[in-house]
Image (spheres, coloured by chain):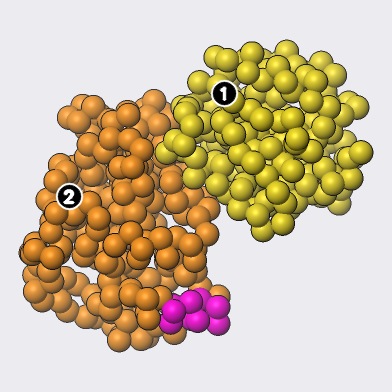
Chain colours: A yellow, B orange
Amino acid sequence: MISVIDLCYREDSLSREEFVTPIERLLRRSGREFNTRHYTAPDIEAADAAILCGTALMDTGFTKRPDLFCWLLEFERPVLGISSGMRALAAAFGAGVEPGCGIGMTEVEVLSPDPLFAGKERFSAYEVRGCAVRVPRGFMALAVSKECVQAIRHRSLPLYGLLFHPEVRNEWLIERFLGLADQWP
Amino acid sequence: MRLGVLFSGGKDSAFACWKAMQKEEVVCLITIISRNPESYMFHTPNIRLAALQAESAGLPLLEMETEGEKETELLDLRGALLAARERFGIEGLVTGAILSVYQATRLQRVCYELGLWCFNPLWLADQDEYMEELLDAGFRVIITGVFASPFDESWLGREIDRRTLDELRMIARKHRITLTGEGGEFETFVIDAPFFSRRVAIGEGSKVYRNHNGVFRIERAGLAAR
């Protein structure tokens, strides 16, 4: 079962259909079971993996409650943090952000071999970010654009962060992540 | 949150408006009237009738004209949003963008520059589910422009009811067009919506059609009881 975490400004918000529903649709299409919870009340006990969804550019309320993301430190199962979700993942592991807004399509270059990106060295991706995210200790930069790090991964656990939105034109990345989650012991 | 809706009078912006009304407070509609028929962002044949729809919705309408040049129309959009913030205190914008990264990117940038929230409740929507939801919610929508094969003149002015939706589905499958017209294959106008107090009654319309390209121009319309 995949735990989908909604990071938007409140439960069942106007942003939900923009950032959470597209992920749920992909999960449904791939035949995965999932449950969606707002970040203020995560339910990760029975989860095999977690996906932290993005938020609107102006929506940074989730950054005010780092305590609600502490579970990520001990989760030790596959995690995919998307855009704001990457920011929350990095923050849980002690990394902050730096200035740098990016909106639109950007070229992403893969730096290190990883099963998530296998066979793709460069691709175009859609970003909507108000800042860049630093690489936390214990993580590595997996992919970059001209401006900043676009993908990170924990050095020994399948914890991934993508700064761009894979649900736009790069759905294959979410499918790959689900494949990795299936294989995780 | 007080929101303005970027409103063209077509189904996407009207449905986005309806969605926004369920969750936040919609305080005005914003219409950009482009004089350039080639405008990627804002051109649509019956844009002047947005005033009638706004009246039926009981919402103030902020109209902004633009020459419709590629980048200056964004400045005009910016101007419209600034005016909406000043007059109606909007904190965010709602758009009907579904798939267009081109459109979404530009709208997101303008909003972010102005410190406005940007909501796209139809973003990446499943086309079939969306069209079903639209009809289920009680929207009545007509086709006011066709810009792709195999649409002929008979499509102009036609209401998208269940039967027409089935036909559109078949065409979408066969001709690789989007069911929602998101690729610019057709344009629509909303004649009734769950947030309208009265329906738009079309008194007179005219068709201009040539070679899979045509427009249904509403010449005379008013509001009427359902």
Q: Is residue A56 above or below residue B220?
A: above
Q: Residue at x 14, y 54 (%)?
A: B197
Mark 2: give few (<14), some (14-19) or many (20+) Cα within 10 Å: some
- Residue A98, percent across and down? 62, 17
Q: Residue at x 27, y 66 (%)?
A: B140
Q: Is residue B173 magenta?
A: yes
Numbered range of the magenta stretch? B166-174
Residue at the extreme front: A46
In the image, is A10 to the left or to the right of A131?
left
> Chief secondary structure of the magenta span?
helix
- Residue A68, percent across and down? 63, 18
**Camera-side residue: B27 or B109?**
B27
- Residue B58, percent across and down? 14, 46
Find numbered disc 2 in the image and state the secondary structure of the residue it sits on. helix
What type is the residue that disc 1 sits on?
A: Thr
- Please tell me the numbered disc located at residue B169: none
Res. A150 image quadrant: top right
Which residue is disc 2 drawn over? B57
| Number of disc labels | 2
What type is the residue that disc 2 sits on?
A: Ala
Q: Is residue A13 above or below residue B211?
A: above
Q: How far apart are the alpha carbons under marks 2 and 1?
A: 36 Å
Q: Is residue A38 above or below residue A71?
A: below
Q: Residue at x 63, y 28 (%)?
A: A42
Q: Is residue A55 above or below residue B107?
A: above
- Residue B9, percent across and down? 25, 57
In the image, is A156 to the left or to the right of B123?
right
Which residue is disc 1 drawn over? A40
